[in-house]
Amino acid sequence: MSPAFDPKKDLVELKGKVIIVTGANRQSGLGYSTVKHLVREGAKVYIAARNEQQSLESIEKLKEDLRLGQDGPGSDGQVHFLKLDLGDPRNVKKVAEDFMAKESRLDVLVNNAAMVMAPFEKTSDGSISKVVVTNPFVFTQTLLPLLTKTAQEEDSDVRIINISSITHYIVPSIKKLETVEDLNQEFHGRPVAKFFRYAHTKLLIIIWARALHKHLNSLSSITPGASRIIVMSLNPGNVDTFSNRWPLPWLWRPLVRMLMTAPNVDIGVYPMVFAAAGKTVREDREKYTGAYMSEKRDVVDPSNNARSDKLAEELWTLLQKIMKDMAL
């Protein structure tokens, strides 16, 4: 296991840095606590989410808890709302383009949003599973020019952090990712099919991150800065972000937390905060870029599916075709 990590001591300088965290609107969620740590250290963070009311309530809570805009530690940080519906790829592209017109830099993108235990549904045009389309493919690719521009600055530290899950290991062997139907895995007939669909999307994130890392490296000769962007995927661990929504939470919470890898969410997000802004990642860039990290902050091997260069190339090619067909 990696050495102990303290976000109050072990983060890079974040003042002046601009960060986006997707899906950070729920106050009991991983994204929200990740935002809290980053803003506390002076970053300007955008909560990118669909639910505006919930996001604005979370922002007010952060401002109150961190005393943002007041004298004292953390007062230099900022938190803003960015309305983003990942279920609509065209909206995603427009939001990313509008963001690039407004901000002159983007230092860290944390792709945290996901659909958990969702029914099998396709987008309004009937092409792609909604569970798959909420992955960060379109949003990240549209933002690449700004990420790359920031990476060209001297002493830059640009990162794309993709939140996956240990569940990706249970996905059966994948033979190919050449067509949309290869993405739209329904897992019909399997027990807990919703769980398998979730695990499948988390696997796709790791495969795509592998492809993105290779793509950025291939641009090094024509796009300065691209190969300096750190791309990581990680398993955040087992963190109780849900028992408070169950009936009789007071009864279930102690039982659920016996199975968790962290005592609370603020500590449970340490792997995410470490990946997004840890000094160690910056100091050992070669170790972490393109890597998959466990909840113990160790670089480990993901599944055989996730390590496949063939699947990574096929997925990258397929996504480019889908974006072209959708005029994105």
Image (spheres, helix red, strand yellow):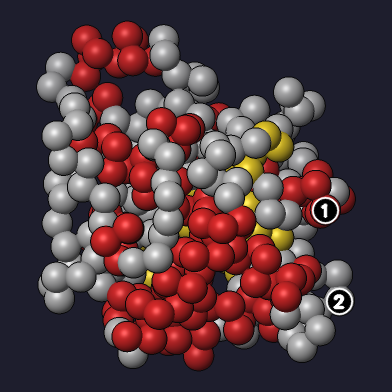
Residue at 73 percent across and 75 percent down: it is 218
N-terminal of the pair, mark 1 or mark 2, is 2
Instruction: Please report the residue visible at 41 percent of the width from the left and 31 percent of the height from the top.
Output: 170
In-image side of 168 versus 291 (left or right):
left
Q: Is residue 121 left or right of residue 293?
A: left
Position of residue 67 relative to residue 216, above or below, is above
Q: SS for tag 2?
A: loop
How many callouts does the rendering have?
A: 2
Q: Nearer the viewer, residue 31 or 77?
A: 31
Residue named by callout 2: 154
Mark 2, Cα crowd under 10 Å, few <14 / some 14-19 / many 20+, is few
The quarter holding residue 296 reads top right
For label 1, count other residues whose C-alpha is less than 10 Å away and answer few (under 14), some (14-19) or many (20+).
few
Q: Position of residue 107 (x, y in %)?
A: 65, 68
As drawn, 60 above or below 227: above
Three-letter code for the amino acid on which mark 2 is drawn: Glu
Quadrant for residue 17, please give it.
bottom right
